[in-house]
Image: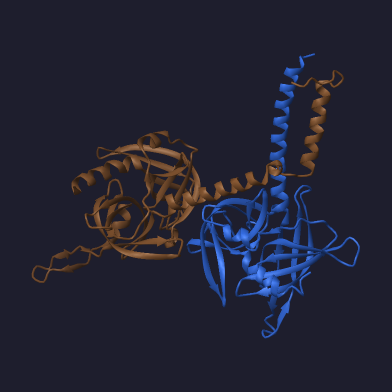
Chain colours: A blue, B brown
Amino acid sequence: MLPMPKTNFLVSILLLCLVSVASYASDGETKCREMLYTSVFVSAETTNGSGTIIGKTATEMNGVFRYSVLTNEHITKGRWVIYPKSPNKKVDKGCIVWTFDHTANSYESYPASVIVENREVDISLLAFSSSEVLSVAKFATQKMLDKIGVFDEVFAIGCNLKDDFPGPTVGIISLIHTELMGEVDVIIYANTAQIVPGASGGGLFKEYGNHYYLIGIPFRVGLIEEGHVAPHLAEAISTSAVKNLIHENAEILP
Amino acid sequence: MVSLPSRITPICLVLMLFVGVIFLAAENKPAISSVPEKQCNLHEIQKVDQIAIKQREMRDPIVRVETRQALGSGTIYEKLDTGTKNLFEYRVLTNQHVTQTRMMFPSDADFLTGKLIILPIDTGCSIDVFDHKNQKQKRYVVKVVAENPYLDLAILSFETDDPITVALLATDEILESIRVFDNVFALGCQLGMRPTPTFGIISDIISGVTRQVKWMLYGTTSQIASGSSGGGLFVEYDGHYYLIGIILRAAVTRDHHIMPHLANAISLSTAKNFLEENRVSKE
């Protein structure tokens, strides 16, 4: 047997290694749980994109939860269909939310109802019921949003190219500007976390004290030339705009 | 050192610690949770300070260069005393392919001989300097001090009494230490917007000689787009950010699509001789 002091030294080294591995794994899992697992795919009759689960409430039915999903209005508006025979009549075909189990590599779909829709700010809130226990994104507080600056590291989560599981991209905030959307001044975060069509409605996240908070909704990407997107010129609507919308519609939200 | 009872063998100790670590991982407690709150705040403050340094040293010296036909970027690299109180001359480094677009070449036939006459007209150049804090910008008409089409570099000059941030130029020591995989930031007015940063790595270092002039280019994955030309490529060194290159171009596919992550920048080591030559000629 080795003398005790040496053993203690070896144990300390081993402990250090294990703690490092555990904290690394823990950080990776935190990222997945707080960002990736909260992302869903939203499909409508003529459009599709991404969404982020932002709320969860228990229902009267045992074990069934009501989830709310934040996405873009330009995705949910595709649920309206106009038939050529009756051009004056719009039919609501509804939206479907697809949730993903990344460990089992499987997915589930749920019919979702549109609770709030704001075309000017390009934001929609959907709700669906499920017995599955799904991850819910943390909303950044106003204090956190106020601190966001150019060069801050951010993650964008969304279903890039529309037919894939949600995936993350990393980048930095490149510009913060205010845009008049309808009658509302909305803060826009330009960032280099690459997105492509399909990522609209997903989530833009920032780390704060080892947790990841939703700070924006990716909604558009720059065009270098006609029909050719520049994935690193992404823009997201600040969640400060969403908070107002939620506050205004607090009574009808799940 | 505290002696342990002989019954507890090292293997048992390791197993106990291992179980403890598994519990820690299962609870998903971040490693920092054991760090006192004050230290966490200090970490946050340091992060905020670092962001402020990045903004001041990289974003603030970048300007938008505008001619009648094109938009590009430029980097303010020098502040000179004019002799008048509070009035300074600032110098901007950009690409010659940006400044050359100020020239127009209208042609006409000679009234008597019928020969084609080309009359070059210099339509001038202006820059927009940005006050990011107040989301304002100010336009200055600039003078083109020097141009080198072979190096694709140009120097602009303007005078103002406004305080403007000047980029830190990398020393020879910094430039010599640059290697592939080094982290870099590219700053330019992509698509004519306000200066925006992108982050990447040095992917290639290419050098050569053209017309007896040595040149060096950095390949970088920091994405750029049209309008970034003339902007700055920066590297961090001892907590500060130094200009190491001037953004030149991005690769284009056969079907004419720009590849933003296949960017090239002219090394400051190439530009330094050009800057030095023109400093001497002015004095």
Relative to residue A62, is residue B46 drawn left or right? left
Of B150 and B138, nearer the camera is B138
Q: Is residue A195 above or below residue B180?
A: below
Relative to residue B169, is residue A165 drawn left or right? right
Return the residue found at the far right: A62
Of A243 and A63, nearer the camera is A243
Q: Is residue B257 above or below residue A127?
A: above
Res A93 quadrant in image: bottom right
Percent position of residue A235, x then y:
55, 62
How many dots with numbers? 0
Percent position of residue A70, x then y:
69, 65
Residue at left 76%, top 14%? A3
Relative to residue B107, is residue A179 drawn left or right? right
Q: Is residue A68 above or below residue A12?
A: below
Of B191 and B275, nearer the camera is B275
Is residue B223 at least partly visible in the picture?
no
The quadrant the N terminus of chain A occupies is top right
Residue at left 44%, top 48%? B263
Percent position of residue A99, x then y:
76, 58
Relative to residue B238, is residue A76 drawn left or right? right
Percent position of residue B222, x then y:
48, 48
The quadrant the C terminus of chain A occupies is bottom right
Res A91 quadrant in image: bottom right
Is residue B217 at least partly visible in the picture?
yes
Return the residue found at the far left: B112
